[in-house]
């Protein structure tokens, strides 16, 4: 049997230059098969199609490529399958709150099976841009602010999409995007420029990409951003030096949508031809949407401005992925060999993901879980209580809104006829400023003992190009909450949103608060199970929640500064005496009006029981520079019901050749405990986990003293030290 390299080299040997460039060109679907597209496929000008759906249509498109083009090379067919296909899972940031790689792997597996049954064989996920900016709409698609968490979860997503063998039915190629630094878009404004040091790139932005490359992700996508003056799509440092030379990556790189032609808009290329030249020379193997490669690469090669060897490499990368997908042997999709989309197993997986993504932010006097037997009159209020579309979130092209089960439906089902449930939308949308619905909402609230509010952001307020400069609850939602709070009833707020919101004001209006993100198809039953205590919440924040938007970027793993803030040195604006003289002595790094801490820290999340961490100990307080230690702690469920805790391990490298973060996540695990039960949790910490890129960009473990914390959030519960020798 001939192996992949032989197969690819042999095929490459038969290809004309034009056919090679065709493989490097991805065409946007236009619905159906227009004549010119069919002709382009026949003439070998198309390597890939994106955003076209329907199994019959895709099989026909594939047939033209396989049967009517000279070499019969099948197409790779891409689609944004970001958090589910027709069965919608929570947005990625919500899934990240599960801190559970198996949940993410399963979500991607279900999405892959459903998408593959429609003829899709490549998704543009996971998005593993580390971001510390909740204004940025695409934070919804991300796995949060931490490189370690995003690495573990990103790899799980790749494994879910790709399985152990890409050629097996129901497995699709994944895409690590957007390489790199896109999450640092200035001011959280999408597509804006990125100013980022090489140190920050290597120590924070790259690790999830490196982890996915090591896990065999089939493709990478370059970012839209101008990074330090060189757009990612023309950035040979990123795409050649780091990705190919240092990481030895073998998959292919696709540009983002029109990002090659946008090199002109950036002011980096004068015209299409120059854009094609920069992108090809930087190492973009496939051009998405725009067609500068088709128009100019041949000529650029003739002129010696682009090297044909680089083109051969690009084509090899692309053909290799097609080979791995088994497309040369089996280009067509037989939909009938797949399980039905939206089947009960898929819905159950989506429900479990939604449950595990919910984060309990506040629960005064244990208002939650609600005890059914104590309920008589319940008011369900809010624009997101019963809106199938809005609970699906951003990046949903194929999701079936009609399959969604809303919170109101689920609460009705759970409580049956024994409880009087009154419902008012209160506000037409999350962002409306129209208060006409207040009266009805207040009236039903007045008639009820328990009020459950569903507020937040509608789907379109987050996602690509949907950034916000104010991240409070939009519209007049806080006003409605305030009015309702004046009734003095037991009030629970469930927030559905695509990003962290500033909840400083909101939190005071309610007794309990659950952050459910955009939870997808099964959001309703998942939230209902948590409200009524069928399951205890276990989610933890994958990103810090600021008090005020002006604190952004605020994240747990920042560096220390020379004057770090403390409670003793913090002065609140109202406490400064009038006509105080200017002084900086003894002052530290904080905002007069917001302090120095987020409202809810990274890793935070409550549940219905109490967890107690104790007896932290290490196998040794000395770690050889190439060795490891075991970290042990006892975790007791000292409350009265079973629950899952996500135990977290953090370290701090006290002194480095570059200043190091005040905390870094280095391990986490989900621990299930019965009431009264104690388990020993064990983390294996390797010296290599402590490595970072130093001033000369060497990846090093530096000897020295380290802090270590184990606990239920980035605030840590238990602390000790160790030394690397
Ligand atoms: C986005 C990508 C996406 C692509 C294809 C672009 O606008 O930035 O993340 O995969 O479109 O739809």
Image: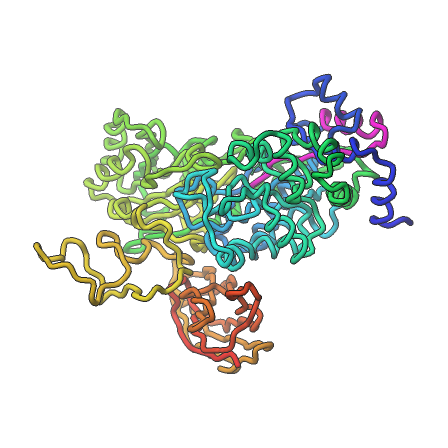
Q: Residue at x 61, y 56 (%)?
A: 210
As drawn, is 312 to the left or to the right of 192?
right
Picture coordinates of residue 537 (x, y %)? 43, 53
Picture coordinates of residue 664 (x, y %)? 46, 64
Q: In the displayed orientation, state which residue is furthest to the top.
A: 35
Front residue of this view, candidates 237 and 270: 270
Picture coordinates of residue 197 (x, y %)? 48, 55
Front residue of this view, candidates 352 and 160: 160
Q: Quadrant of residue 319?
A: top right
Picture coordinates of residue 489 (x, y %)? 23, 43
Classify 30 as above or below 308: above
Q: Quadrant of residue 220?
A: top right
Q: Magenta span covers which residues?
A: 56-84
As drawn, is 586 to the left or to the right of 689?
left
Front residue of this view, candidates 85 and 680: 85
* Ligand 1: quadrant of the figure: top right
Q: Tell me, what colour scheme is on the image?
A: rainbow
Numbered-mark total? 0
Front residue of this view, candidates 143 and 421: 143
**438 drawn magenta:** no
Q: Residue at x 42, y 60 (%)?
A: 557
Classify 23 as above or below 701: above
Q: In the displayed orientation, state which residue is furthest to the front.
A: 303
As drawn, is 656 to the left or to the right of 115?
left
Q: Is residue 306 visible?
A: yes
**72 drawn magenta:** yes
Q: Is residue 336 visible?
A: no
Q: Residue at x 84, y 35 (%)?
A: 15
Q: In the displayed orientation, state which residue is furthest to the left.
A: 579
């Amino acid at each position: 049997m001939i192996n992949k390299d032989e197969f690819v080299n042999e095929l490459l040997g038969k290809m004309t230059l034009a056919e090679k460039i065709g493989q490097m060109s991805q065409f946007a679907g236009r619905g159906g098969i227009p004549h010119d597209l069919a002709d382009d496929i026949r003439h070998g000008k198309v390597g890939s199609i994106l955003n076209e759906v329907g199994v019959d249509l895709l099989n026909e498109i594939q047939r033209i490529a396989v049967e009517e083009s000279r070499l019969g090379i099948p197409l790779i067919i891409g689609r944004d399958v970001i958090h589910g296909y027709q069965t919608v899972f929570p947005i990625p940031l919500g899934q990240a709150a599960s801190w559970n790689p198996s949940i993410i792997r399963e979500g991607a597996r279900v999405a892959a099976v459903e998408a593959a049954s429609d003829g899709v064989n490549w998704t543009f996920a996971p998005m593993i841009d580390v971001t510390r900016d909740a204004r940025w709409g695409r934070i919804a698609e991300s796995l949060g602010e931490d490189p370690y968490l995003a690495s573990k979860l990103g790899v799980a997503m790749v494994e879910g999409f790709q399985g152990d063998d890409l050629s097996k039915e129901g497995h699709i190629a994944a895409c690590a995007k957007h390489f790199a630094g896109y999450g640092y878009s200035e001011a959280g404004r999408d597509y804006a420029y990125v100013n980022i040091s090489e140190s920050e790139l290597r120590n924070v932005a790259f690790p999830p990409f490196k982890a996915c490359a090591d896990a065999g992700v089939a493709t990478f996508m370059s970012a839209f951003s101008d990074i330090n003056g060189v757009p990612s799509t023309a950035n040979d440092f990123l795409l050649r030096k780091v990705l190919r030379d240092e990481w030895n990556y073998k998959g292919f790189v696709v540009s983002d949508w029109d990002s090659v032609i946008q090199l002109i808009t950036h002011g980096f290329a004068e015209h299409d031809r120059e854009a094609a030249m920069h992108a090809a020379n930087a190492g973009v193997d496939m051009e998405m949407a725009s067609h500068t490669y088709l128009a100019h690469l041949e000529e650029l090669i003739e002129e010696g401005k682009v090297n044909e060897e680089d083109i051969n490499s690009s084509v090899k990368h692309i053909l290799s992925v097609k080979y791995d997908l088994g497309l040369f042997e089996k280009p067509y999709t037989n939909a009938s060999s797949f399980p039905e989309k939206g089947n009960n197993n898929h819905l159950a997986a989506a429900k479990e993901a939604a449950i595990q993504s919910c984060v309990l932010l506040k629960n005064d006097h244990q208002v939650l879980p609600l005890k059914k037997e104590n309920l008589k009159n319940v008011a369900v209020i809010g624009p997101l209580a019963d809106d199938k579309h809005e609970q699906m979130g951003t990046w949903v092209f194929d999701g079936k809104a009609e399959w969604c089960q809303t919170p109101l439906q689920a609460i009705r089902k759970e409580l049956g006829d024994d409880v009087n449930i009154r419902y008012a939308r209160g506000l037409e949308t999350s962002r409306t400023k129209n208060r006409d619905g207040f009266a009805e909402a207040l009236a039903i609230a007045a008639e009820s003992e328990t009020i459950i509010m569903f507020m937040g952001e509608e789907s379109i307020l987050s996602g690509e190009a949907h950034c916000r400069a104010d991240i409070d609850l939009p519209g007049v939602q806080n006003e409605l909450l305030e009015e309702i709070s004046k009734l003095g009833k037991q009030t629970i707020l469930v927030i559905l949103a695509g990003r962290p919101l500033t909840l400083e004001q909101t939190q005071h209006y309610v007794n309990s608060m659950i952050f459910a993100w955009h939870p997808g198809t099964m959001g309703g039953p998942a939230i209902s199970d948590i409200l009524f205590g069928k399951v205890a919440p276990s989610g933890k924040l994958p990103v810090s929640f600021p008090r005020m938007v002006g604190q952004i970027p605020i994240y747990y793993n920042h560096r220390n500064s020379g004057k770090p803030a403390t409670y003793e040195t913090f002065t609140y604006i109202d406490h400064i005496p009038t006509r105080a003289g200017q002084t900086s002595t003894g002052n530290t790094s904080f905002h007069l009006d917001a302090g120095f801490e987020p409202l809810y820290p990274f890793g935070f999340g409550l549940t219905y029981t109490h967890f107690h961490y104790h007896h932290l100990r290490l196998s040794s307080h000395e770690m050889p520079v190439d060795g490891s230690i075991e970290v042990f702690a006892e975790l007791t469920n000292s409350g009265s019901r079973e629950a899952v805790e996500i135990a977290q391990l953090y370290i701090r490298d006290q002194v480095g050749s570059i200043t190091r973060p005040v905390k870094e996540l280095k391990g986490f695990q989900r621990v299930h405990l019965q009431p009264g039960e104690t388990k020993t949790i064990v983390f294996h910490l390797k010296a290599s986990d402590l490595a970072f890129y130093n001033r000369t960009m060497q990846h090093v473990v530096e000897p020295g003293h380290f802090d270590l914390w184990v606990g239920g959030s980035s605030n840590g519960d238990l602390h000790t030290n160790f030394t690397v020798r």
